[in-house]
Amino acid sequence: MKTAVVVGALGVIGRYIVDKLAALPDWQVIGLSRRKGEDRDRVRYVSVDLVRPFEPDFSGVTHVFYAAFQASVGKASGYAANIAPNRDMLINSVSAIDKTSPALERVILVTGTKYYGTHLGPFRTPARESDPRHEGANFYFDQIDWLTTFQRGKRWTWSELRPQTLCGFAPGTAMSIVPVIAVYAAMMKELGRPFAWPGTPGSGRAIYQVTDSAHFANAALWAATDPRCANQAYNITNGDYFRWLDLWPRLAQAFDMPTAAPAPLSLTEFMADKAPLWDAMVAKYGLKPYRFEDIAAWPFGDYVFNTTWDVMTSVTKSRLDGFHDVVDSEDMFVRLLKQFRKERIVP
Ligand SMILES: NC(=O)c1ccc[n+]([C@@H]2O[C@H](COP(=O)([O-])OP(=O)(O)OC[C@H]3O[C@@H](n4cnc5c(N)ncnc54)[C@H](OP(=O)(O)O)[C@@H]3O)[C@@H](O)[C@H]2O)c1
């Protein structure tokens, strides 16, 4: 039996890792976050604020999946500069588990493609793991430097995974694109307005990539258990690329809406006064009662939809080292959007 601690267990990455491991017969899971999830068979949640020192009351942990994140207020592209809490949460959780669990085998650190400066401007594409870091501050660099230094001389090893724009559902997440699309579509339909591409035409034509959260959980399991992944970093995306303007008509179809010409719009500004409309829609359509501020993060939508340069990383290294799963991103968006409607998250 392996024991995993998933740090950030309720996030758009963490909750999919918990679900993945919980479905396997030889794993038990401890999930850490400030909120407490619902305990179930072989899954236990512990409520803890990791910004403060942490003294765990568990031992025998074999794997840590670190997917916690604290966003700063303001533009989504500024998140990476939010160093102190994100560095401290990693140090507090991993050093405490290292101290109490001599059985520790591997620590999986989730970072992202902002490592290459995807949020700052054009970068060398497709980016490879060996490419240099971007200039300037990024909490990933502090996390990686601390973890790799701390690990030296220990029995356990680390793997670092770099996904791009996770696609899944986790209310309260600052970076989650599928609910942004779903709620935007539902609102426009309700207002009798077209489902137009809200970014600039230039950003709609740039190359983009995403990572399905369930696919990422498969990659995390591979990285945690394959000997080849010891002390290695990997880009993890669906393995394909697309342009938003090509994809948009299929997304419109998933909401039974006609395709419209692009109409640049600041989602953050447009949605600023829409909470009452959302609450009315929740009542009218019998939707799950998520608060408007928890369900979609509009600054993140603006950030993703206004990236005018190609965002493209190479997943060749992960393929060569044994992770061969791929996801068709267009099909994934349609599947997730239909799931959101079916589960009454949006009408
Ligand atoms: N989302 C994306 O599209 C994306 C893309 C590329 C890379 N990444 C990277 O992936 C990593 C995880 O991000 P995410 O988007 O999955 O985050 P997320 O969905 O916002 O989840 C963050 C998790 O951390 C927990 N958390 C936050 N502050 C905490 C604290 N003080 N103590 C304990 N737990 C805390 C949250 O739960 P509570 O709020 O209940 O504490 C939640 O479970 C980050 O490094 C991020 O940069 C994300």
Image: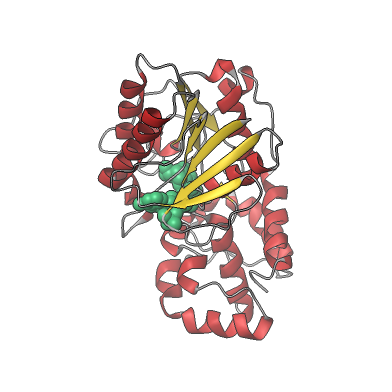
User: Residue at the spot x=68%, y=56% of the render?
Assistant: 336
x then y, percent, for residue 11: 50, 51
Toward which corner of the image does residue 98 lie, by quadrant?
top left
User: Residue at the spot x=59%, y=45% of the render?
Assistant: 18
**Above-or-below relation of 75 to 219:** below
User: Residue at the spot x=56%, y=21% of the render?
Assistant: 317
- In what quadrant of the picture does the N terminus appear? top right
Q: Going by the image, does 268 lie left or right of 277?
A: left
The answer to whether residue 311 of the structure is visible from this angle is yes
Toward which corner of the image does residue 195 lie, by quadrant?
bottom right
Using the image as rendered, state which of residue 88 and residue 218 is in the foreground: 88
- The total number of labels drawn is 0
In the rendered image, the residue lying farthest to the top is 153
x then y, percent, for residue 67: 46, 42
**Above-or-below relation of 68 to 171:** above
Colouring mode (rainbow / by chain / secondary structure / one colour)? secondary structure
x then y, percent, for residue 279: 54, 82
The answer to whether residue 266 of the structure is visible from this angle is no
Q: Going by the image, does 25 lie left or right of 157?
A: right
- In what quadrant of the picture does the C terminus appear? bottom right
User: Residue at the spot x=69%, y=31% of the render?
Assistant: 325
